[in-house]
Amino acid sequence: MKNIFIAGSLAAMLFVSCKKDKAIGTPVEIKPDYALPQAGASTADNNRVVQLFNDYGSYFLYVYTQKDFEWTQATSTGNSRIDTAVLGNPQYVGAMLDYLNDVWLKFLPADFKKKGGIPYRIFLADSIRQYRTGYPPGMEYLYTDIKVSGKAIGFAGMNSGLLTMTPAVKTTRKLALTTAIWNYYLGNNIVDIPASFYNVSNYTAAAPATPLNTSNPANVEAYRQKGFLPNGYNAVSGAPFEWHNGAFSWTNAKSNDISAFIFNLTQRTDAQMASYLTYPLIRQKWDILVNHFQTKYGIDVRAIANATY
């Protein structure tokens, strides 16, 4: 009898639920995040922005709010930090697109651009300022060429300076943009690193007792033989900065190692790298990465580094 009662109850509930069914109304329209074209740029430049969105699903925006760009406050040091984008003059949208293509986009194949190579939002700005409280008037702002924020990147420089930029300045900016963009790719798993790269060097060796620098050439030589590159260079003297100094940096040896290789792969010319590539393990790891990025993503990382203006 209990089973009959349960079955009857279920049937009654089903009948009632069917009686209460109503027709589904008109679907709610999901509007795009931004309306293109935006107002201010020429028709030709707006057409380029629209085409970039149609091709790659990425918004290249020159009209946006500070909330769009990002507002961040950090108090870990006792000072607030506010990153602010100053909107550029729309008449320079075309010149800005040319600039970004020359230092970044032309090196990427179409498929890679569609699969995250271009973030969802690109903010075109005159300048990007960082306000720091507690500093004297006139010294409270820092400026940067690029700001990565989540799935968006802001680029500064959309102003008359694009029309008079020297090759040296363009190269310097390319290097700064390349560093931030490739950190973004790695951090968001847009590109990966093959296991074969990490299988070459020994990451369990202890750090040297004395620093790696020109005063300790034996240490430098030993670590080159182990397959390790510098992670930067002095802008004036060209002297290398070594990441493997001290116990702490050595606990993050793998991440430091790949960062150093990506830096050199994308920023140092063939001539600058020639002496390093005479070391067998450096050369082996180098070739692994060059082939990996070319084969899997269609990116010639050496073309990025060797580009001149």
Image (cartoon, grey):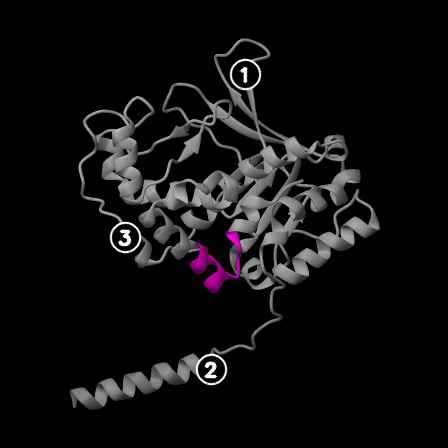
Identified at 72% across, 56% down, the residue is: 50
Q: Which mark is residue 200?
A: 3
Identity of the amino acid at label 3?
Answer: Val
Residue at the outermost right position: 43
218 relative position to 302: left or right: left
Q: Amino acid at mark 1?
A: Glu
Q: Quadrant of the C terminus?
A: top right
- Residue denoted by label 1: 140
Separation (CA) of disc 3 from disc 2: 69 Å
Q: Is there CB contact under 8 Å for labels 3 and 2?
A: no
In this orientation, which residue lies closer to the viewer: 142 or 297?
A: 297
Q: Earlier in the sequence, mark 3 or mark 2?
A: 2
* Mark 1, secondary structure of its residue: loop
Q: Which residue sits at x=56%, y=50%?
A: 303
Decide: few, some or many residues near mark 2? Use Cα within 10 Å; few <14, some 14-19, many ≥20. Answer: few
Residue at 70% of width from left, 31% of height from top?
166
Q: Secondary structure at mark 3?
A: loop
Q: Which residue is mark 2?
A: 19
All told, the count of numbered labels is 3
Label 2, label 1: how far apart the Cα atoms are: 68 Å
Quadrant in the picture for residue 242? top left
Check the picture and name the quadrant holding the N terminus. bottom left
Q: Earlier in the sequence, mark 1 or mark 3?
A: 1
Residue at 21% across, 30% down: 208
